[in-house]
Amino acid sequence: MKKTERLITLDAFRGITVSLMIMVNQPGSWSYKYDQMRHAQWNGCTLTDMVFPFFLFIVGIACWFAFQKYGQTLSTDLISKIIRRTVLIFLLGLTLNFCKQWISSGELNLSMLRITGVLQRIAFCYGIGAILCLALKPRVLLISSLGILIVYWIVLWMAGGSQPYTAEHTIVGKIDVFLLGENHLRQGYPVDSSGIFASIPGVVNVIWGYLMGMMIYKVNDRKKLILKMFLIGVPAILVAQVWNLVFPINKTLWTSSYVLYTSGWAFVVLAILIWIIDVHKKSKYFSPFMVFGINPLFAYILTELWASIMSGMIKFHFEGSLVSLKSWIFGEIFAPLFGNLNGSLLYSIFVMLFYWWILSLMLKYKIFIKV
């Protein structure tokens, strides 16, 4: 498979994931969302729950191609680059939390600053996953990843009492409180959705993405590659559903069955994209998504900050009440025209297209922001 084809497919997959992330994170109203645009209340997996593990899977694929120029071996220079990137992504996430706290409350309170977050989990999983991928041979890496999932299952099962997978009894939240303190976790939830301990199985999403990248690189026959991906992905989904009977698929706990289930779907979705883009040469259908796929980190930070500004900073009096700009746009334009549910969905699409316009300008002028 040619290098350009690999990059186009990966950028398309990343762009679709980022655009979906924007839509599920920025509805017109959190009270009005279609079920697949919400996270599962606890156990289960919706389309929304696929976004984060897909992104970690993509990080792993990107690692394979990025490490090719280093011969897929650890070196002092490469370790320093991995550590530097890990620290930068983590600090960006922390800074984003800092800005969102100031926007929402108008004050800076370090004692209540949330340390966890999406970028922080990405940094954690990337840093550990990248070093493991380079340090271990593929077979040992695969066995080690399965070992991580099994050990994680055992720990949750043994340490959670009679109901080990409920929010009130799981060891996951208790470990995060012990490590970071309750004030530095997501407030109002018994378990932080991006906590430290549940990030450990997330490393496996990166590892399996890396192994997927190796497969894409080494299997030149694209139809054979697609068949292999389906033969891995479909059984993974089915096994995860069986595992779900004893270890529920759960995003907040990032359970081992959840890792297997979402990774299986990542294989299937990527196989379909390779079939469309590489086999049938229909990359033009995905060109709009490339805009998000090329600048994903900036896209995430931009959307999170602007959403906070629209909801928490820009407010004005309207009909005797203080309303945010976002609430006014949804309540006065989208809801009256399209109804609450469809209006909320169309608002998220409108916002996504707004960000697409900004990012398309960056692409036009060749502005790429990476760490």
Image (cartoon, helix red, strand yellow):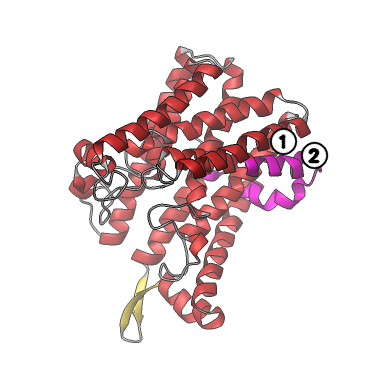
Q: Quadrant of residue 138?
A: top right
The residue lying toward the viewer, choosing from 313 and 64, is: 64
- Where residue 175 appears, as percent x and y from the top left, is 24, 38
Residue occupying the point 36% across, 28% down: 151
| Number of marks | 2
**Please, what is the dominant secondary structure of the magenta stretch?**
helix
> In the drawing, does residue 99 fall left or right of residue 240?
left
Pick out the residue farthest to the bottom: 319
Residue occupying the point 58% across, 51% down: 359
- Where residue 239 appears, as percent x and y from the top left, is 53, 39
- In this orientation, does residue 335 appear? yes
The mark that comes first in sequence, 2 or 1, is 1
Residue occupying the point 46% across, 27% down: 146
Identify the residue under disc 2.
279
- Where residue 223 appears, as percent x and y from the top left, is 77, 34
Residue occupying the point 57% across, 16% down: 70
The residue lying toward the viewer, choosing from 82 and 16, is: 16
Highlighted magenta segment, given as a residue range:
268-296
Identify the residue under disc 1.
226
